[in-house]
Amino acid sequence: MFHLMCWFYSGSVTKSLADLIHLVNENILAKDFDKGDLKEFWALKESNHLDDYQGNAQNIQSSFSALDSWKETSMKIHIPADGVQYAFEDVALLFKVPGLFYQQPLKVIKAAFFPTGWLHSQDWLW
């Protein structure tokens, strides 16, 4: 416990108790977690590995877990054209950008302040 709490209180102030609980319950206590996998761990190498991960090109959703509340959407944006000036943005060319993923801001804010399951296990009023 000492090492875990020292890590929590050191460095970044952006860590929350919810993050700590998630680290322990969903990662360290996970059935497939093997501390031997951390031998020679190098954060930059693992971060680059994730950045280079292409996932399943036919199903990008495979890279984003629905359990993490990711939602897929598309967006249409007006784009400029070389040498053309439009009187109004609404008449500019439309370009559809598919495959955008987002999380609902309120869920992200709640997750930052409350541990997993806390909202459902406590009697409290807003």
Image (cartoon, rainbow, N blue to C red):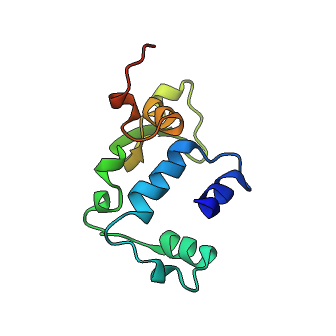
Left or right: 38, with 64 as reference point = right
Classify the position of the C terminus by image quarter: top left
Q: Quadrant of residue 54?
A: bottom left
Query: Does 118 appear above or below 28?
Result: above
Residue 15 x/y as whole percent:
62, 48
Q: Residue at x 33, y 45 (%)?
A: 72
**Residue at the far bottom in the pictured view:** 40
Task: Depth check: give the residue in front, 71 or 121.
Answer: 121
**Residue at the far left in the pictured view:** 58
Residue 89 x/y as whole percent:
53, 28
Q: Residue at x 73, y 55 (%)?
A: 10
Query: Does 24 appear above or below 124?
Result: below
Left or right: 2, with 46 as reference point = right
Q: Residue at x 31, y 68 (%)?
A: 31
Q: Residue at x 39, y 29 (%)?
A: 119
Classify the position of the N terminus by image quarter: bottom right
Q: Quadrant of residue 104?
A: top left
Task: Depth check: give the residue in front, 46 or 3.
Answer: 3
Query: Does 22 appear above or below 102?
Result: below
Residue 24 x/y as whole percent:
46, 57
Left or right: 16, with 35 as reference point = right
